[in-house]
Amino acid sequence: MGVAKSKQVFACSACGGVQTKWLGKCPDCGAWDALVAERLESKAKADPRGSAVQQWTQEQGGQGQVNRAVSVTDIDPKGGALARRIVTGMGELDRVLGGGIVPGSAVLVGGDPGIGKSTLLLQAAGALTKGGHRVLYVSSEESAEQVHMRAARLGVSGQGELFVLSDTSLERIGEQAARVLGEQVEGGTGKPGVLIIDSVQMVYNPAVEAFPGSLTQLRRCTAELVFMAKATGAAVLMVGHVTKDGILAGPRMLEHLVDAVVYFEGDRYHSHRIVRAVKNRFGSTLELGLFEMTGEGLREAPHGVLIAAAGAEGPPRAGTVVCPVLTGTRTLLVELQALTATGFPGAVKRKSSGVDASRLSMLIAVLEQHGGLRLADRDVFASAVGGIKVGEPAADLAMLLAIAGAHYKKAVPARTCAVGEVGLGGEVRAVAQLEQRLTEAARLGFTGVIVPKGKGKMVVPGGVKIELMGVGSVNEAIGLLG
Ligand code: TYD
Ligand code: MG
């Protein structure tokens, strides 16, 4: 190795871009105060096929050591292994990943500390081994005993095919991965192995001259793990932590390196957990995985969930309205909340969380112009319960009714939710997939829905009784508050 030539550079913690001098603003992504001083390793070591990877390929009879170009006619147009997916057996996880994990791909699982990343991956490890895949679960944060105890609590046995390693050195992880998963690739079952790294932030490559935990280490280790997946056909699942202010410490820049990124959405104070794909090279990013955190780990919620401060049966509360929101093919019933308070005229606050800020401004303007509300001197706060992000215009009506309800201290009727898009003229417009939304609302205990007035007759979903209150304008809708 010798003494490597290294020089000081500045890496952007938002996008990973490297600059030769410190700048207040990253010229690549525009982030302020994001550059951190780091040592860059010499050129010779910059090939992501580092030591760990080489050991891995050597153990497989030396294949892959030389990367030879192949004739394009020899490449399976369906992508060969890429066409087959590793079905984890956890339906909700498979759903977010577009039907399973693609062999040879790398998936990043992001989320706040304590949200359930380790739980999900350990349960996935258990399900994968049931399906005949060999799994190496590398914990860089917990001891093997701790992982074992957690596995026992979650009812994960692994049936001998689940291997646990507590280590942070990428070199040793590569060795063990080759030992555990390599023979599986060579073996007869033909089922690709899965390597789980929990978490990638703690892994370091001793050959890289940068401190463990630095962006250089993180980028380099991730690149090597991604290459490991590609070279062997095993899949790699990596955990990445998000920092308090929402930016993944590093992992934002890792998004470019991996094939798929899924994030845990929601907060620790509600039992539901939503796993959303934000990038997927091999599938759509529309799908969600729904889970509930229980004493025995994550339970899948294949139908849908009600995300509200109280159940559907609770008494009506002014300023809160539940809306059946559609994401991918799922309907979530999400409670929208609003609060109005006396503000300083000319300097009123309009704050939103989980709800689009410009949509909120638009709804306030509609309420002023067409609903007869005076909000010019009122602060308006709006949020979606449970850390959920609601982006659908179909949630307009519920948001508007929550604001009007907060203003008048009136609520929508008991067990009633609302859905509809609001136009600038104060009209309530039709929404897509109404029947699906109604079916889910009925299933979760709602008996009435405020909906856009239909042209023809209203749809009543199969078998379930739910009262439809059609409204054509925001004024008609406000008239239903009592
Ligand atoms: P964990 O998977 O360790 O989170 P992460 O890896 O994202 O940091 O989840 C920890 C939280 O989940 C912790 O608050 C306890 C809770 N939990 C349960 O409620 N039930 C369980 O069976 C497990 C394993 C954890
Ligand atoms: Mg964890």
Image (tube, rainbow, N blue to C red):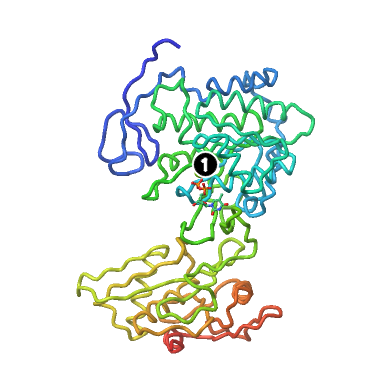
In this rendering, the answer to whether 245 lies above or below 137 is below
Q: Nearer the viewer, residue 296 or 248?
A: 296
Q: Is residue 442 above or below residue 100?
A: below
Specify the quadrant of the image occupied by residue 39: top left
Q: Amino acid at mark 1?
A: Val
Residue 223 visible in image:
yes
The number of callouts visible is: 1
Q: Give the quarter of the image for residue 219.
A: top left
Tell me where residue 478 appears, x and y as whole percent. Answer: 42, 86
Q: Picture coordinates of residue 365 (x, y %)?
A: 33, 76
In screen coordinates, is 149 left or right of 373? right
- Name the quadrant of the N terminus: top left
Indicate yes or no: mark 1 CB to ligand 2 under 8 Å: yes
Q: For numbered disc 1, what is the local secondary structure?
A: strand
Count neighbours of disc 1 (C-alpha within 10 A) and say few if under 14, some if 14 to 19, many if 20 or more: many
Question: Going by the image, does 457 lie left or right of 185?
Answer: left
Is residue 427 placed above or below 109 in the rendered structure? below
Quarter of the picture containing the C terminus is bottom left
Please state the horizontal and vertical placement of residue 466, each as a whole percent of the image.
Answer: 62, 83
- Residue at image position (42%, 87%) is 475
Identify which residue, 183 or 37, lies in the foreground: 183
Instruction: From the viewer's side, name the closer residue of 381 and 49.
Output: 381
Residue picked out by circle 1? 239
Whether 3 is drawn above or below 242: the answer is above
Residue 131 shown left or right of residue 95 in the figure: right
Q: Where in the figure is residue 104, as x and y percent of width and height?
A: 64, 35
The residue furthest right is 188
Front residue of this view, candidates 472 and 56? 56
Query: Can residue 287 be seen in this snapshot?
Result: no
